[in-house]
Image (tube, rainbow, N blue to C red):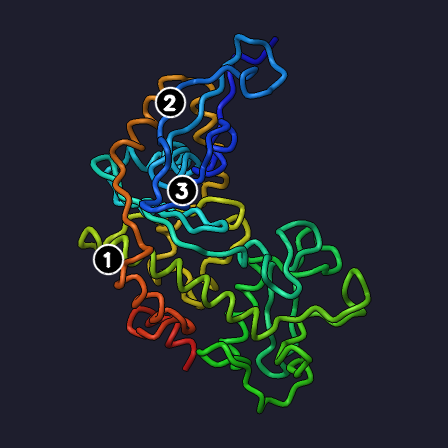
Amino acid sequence: DQISHLVVAANTTMTQFFLEIDPKYLREDPYVPTANFFPPVRAIDLGLKLPDYIHVYTFPAVASYVGGDIVAGTLGSGIFQREELTLFLDVGTNGELVLGNCDWLVCTSCSAGPAFEGGGLKYGMRATTGAIEQVRINPQNYEPMLLTIGKEKPLGICGSGVIDAIAEMLLVGLIEPNGKFNQQLDTDRIRKSETGWEYVVAKAEQSAAGIDDITITEGDIDNIIRTKGAIYAACKILLESVGLTFAELDSFVIAGGFGKYINLERAITIGLLPEIDLDKFMFVGNGALLGERLVSVSREMMGQARNIAETMTNIELANNMKFMDEYVAAQFLPHTDTNAFPKTMEMLK
């Protein structure tokens, strides 16, 4: 009796599944949704066991890979109301970006993969209790010092933890800028396993399971380099599409659970984020949820969300050769363009 309506913010595919619309056209040329805007639907018509007066409001999408969750995040973060130039980044399986201010908005998306959520890593896990979230490495003996979520024995390593670890390994010389281990170092922390070279972050007796050593492999590092390269390249191309650079940003907003634990300095060290003033970065947590809350208490906000989706211009990267060039250039730690990371390069000397 206390529910008056429901609000849903999801990516384009999930929204169409939820509304029982065939999403096959998202995978067929010209790769566009059946529709981006949908009217309210009775919850009971979607199979929800709720009174027939309750309607479901879904956030509109912009494109196949920029969905209602990003529109909700744009609404919730308030970047559409500010005069300041803001870049909004939501990292999940895809990296989705919105650039602009109160006068204009452009957006894009890139395939990021699950690495920053712990997926695709040998001992990767989500950012839950027992996940290694911070790593510091002694430059003299290459022994690690770990901090886990909940301060429990380590179970694995989450996205923020592997970013921390790779940055540390780079700074102390355990790995080269190409992500390969320095095999000449005198330490038993680096070893060759059946799957290749790896660094032992936590020995079995230190781990929660007590069975296997927790390691970071060259394959893990390659995975992170590919992911961070895609995100950095997408950010740069989105800015260049409107004739701007990172230096001209007033703020850089990071959304999603990924941003909760990330160390900005370490993310810059590996070239995931641009080397700009740290004060320009801001975390908003679950951006989509912020937008949903606004709409749940004010239906006028859904009109604002529709306006955001209608006025936002999507920049497609799938066949963008400049993006591919930037992506290749970013397959290095921190980047092949060392001039873009002067402070990091100074630390690496």
* Any part of residue 46 in sight: yes
The residue closer to the viewer here, 275 or 192, is 192
**Local crowd size for mark 3, using a 10 Å CA cut-off: few (<14), some (14–19), many (≥20):** some
- Kindly identify the amino acid type of the residue bearing the numbered disc 3: Leu
* Residue 20 to residue 260: above or below: above
Mark seen at residue 26: 3
Mark seen at residue 304: none
**Local crowd size for mark 1, using a 10 Å CA cut-off: few (<14), some (14–19), many (≥20):** some
- Kindly identify the amino acid type of the residue bearing the numbered disc 1: Thr
The Cα atoms of the two marked residues, 3 and 2, are separated by: 24 Å
Q: Earlier in the sequence, mark 1 or mark 3?
A: 3
The residue closer to the viewer here, 15 or 190, is 15
- The residue singled out by tag 2 in the image is 302
Q: Position of residue 179 (x, y in %)?
A: 49, 76
Q: Looking at the image, which residue is at 38% across and 56% down?
A: 278
Q: Looking at the image, which residue is at 60% across and 14% down?
A: 50
Q: Position of residue 283 (x, y in %)?
A: 45, 45
- Kindly identify the amino acid type of the residue bearing the numbered disc 2: Met
